[in-house]
Amino acid sequence: MHGVIALACVAGLAALGCATPAPLRPAALTTAEAAIAAAAEAGAAELAAEPLSLAREKLALADESVAKGMPTRASRLAEQARVDALLSRALSEKARADRQLAETRRLDAKIRREAESALEP
């Protein structure tokens, strides 16, 4: 009877040893996801699509690296994705600011023309 219990314990321990835990996901991936979401909310898909697309591609590669048990590569790719997302957000904010500046200049020129024509006899 003790032999059967011992055999069952050995089999159970062996099964536990064979079970591979899910690979841990580096925190850098979560940070990159947040940066990508912030860039998308800032309108980057319309105003700075290329770096946002690169960020998404690198994040997907980082996820694949985690699944393959390559956490260092995953972290590096996630950091690159985060930087690409930050660039995308900055470019979209710049594009929006450039549009506002152009509109302000257009209105300024219109007001100047109106003021000059009002001063003419």
Image: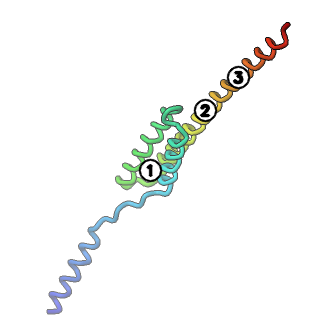
Q: Is residue 117 left or right of residue 90?
A: right
Instruction: Identify the residue shown where x is 66% and y is 25%.
Output: 103
Tag of residue 96: 2
The disc, 3 or 2, on the residue closer to the chain's N-terminal end is 2
Given residues 20 and 121, the one toward you in this image is 121
Crowd tier of the residue under label 3, counting other residues whose Cα lies within 10 Å: few below 14, some 14–19, many 20 or above: few
> Mark 1 highlights which residue?
74
Mark 1 residue type: Ala
Instruction: Identify the residue shown where x is 64% and y is 28%.
Output: 98
Instruction: Identify the residue shown where x is 55% and y is 41%.
Output: 42
The disc, 1 or 2, on the residue closer to the chain's N-terminal end is 1
Q: Is residue 1 left or right of residue 41?
A: left
The percent coordinates of residue 16 (x first, y second) are: 28, 73
- Badge 2 element: helix
> Mark 3 highlights which residue?
107
The percent coordinates of residue 21 (x first, y second) are: 34, 65
Given residues 97 and 80, the one toward you in this image is 97
